[in-house]
């Protein structure tokens, strides 16, 4: 839901038609790939901090990829605080070209200028 709300910086759509279509097609493709492996994709509508805890029971494991941006980090905090204490959480860094530990600086404190300096 958050991705389809207007941006707080100017009120423009955060997800317009092309991006929404790309997202839908990507999810359909992921589901098809998972079904070939004997699994499936479960798509829920709602806020992760409300929907995900309802799916997990004691002894389950929640694995997810950590995010760098403040909005997503706030969702992670809310989600983790809503979980049953008996749910194991495994979070990792992933979707970046370089692992954040290999950057030579803390990206939460400073980004070098020019941006490409660390290459």
Image (spheres, grey):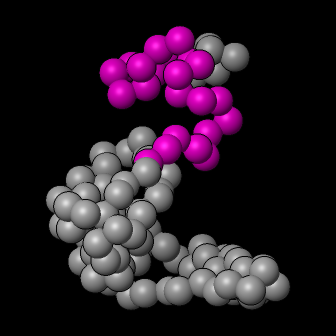
Q: Which residue is drawn at the image coordinates 58% and 44% (left, top)?
A: 94
Q: Which residue is drawn at the image coordinates 42% and 20% (left, top)?
A: 106
Q: Which residue is drawn at the image coordinates 68% and 84% (left, top)?
A: 39
Furthest-front residue in this view: 59
For residue 23, above or below residue 68: below
Foreground of the two, 24 or 101: 101
Q: Tell me where residue 108 sits by quadrant.
A: top left
Indicate yes or no whether the magenta region holds residue 43.
no
**Residue 92, how many percent across, how many down?**
49, 44
Q: Is residue 104 visible?
A: yes
Q: Is residue 18 visible?
A: no
Which quarter shows the C terminus?
top right
Q: Tell me where residue 96 sits by quadrant.
A: top right
Furthest-right residue in this view: 36
For residue 46, above or below residue 99: below
Q: Tell me where residue 47 sits by quadrant.
A: bottom left
Q: Main secondary structure of the magenta part?
A: loop
Q: Which residues are magenta?
A: 91-114
**Residue 73, how many percent across, how many down?**
31, 49
Indicate yes or no whether the magenta region holds residue 113.
yes
**Residue 27, how many percent across, how many down?**
64, 80
């Amino acid at each position: 839901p958050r991705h389809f709300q207007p941006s707080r910086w100017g009120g423009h759509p955060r997800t317009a038609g092309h991006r929404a279509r790309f997202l839908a097609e990507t999810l359909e493709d992921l589901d098809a790939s998972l079904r070939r492996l004997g699994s499936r994709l479960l798509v829920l509508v709602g806020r992760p901090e409300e929907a995900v805890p309802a799916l997990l029971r004691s002894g389950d494991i929640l694995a997810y990829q950590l995010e760098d941006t403040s909005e997503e980090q706030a969702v992670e905090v809310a989600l983790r605080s809503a979980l049953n204490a008996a749910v194991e959480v495994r979070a990792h860094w992933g979707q970046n070209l370089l692992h954040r530990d290999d950057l030579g600086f803390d990206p939460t404190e400073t980004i070098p200028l020019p941006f490409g300096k660390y290459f």
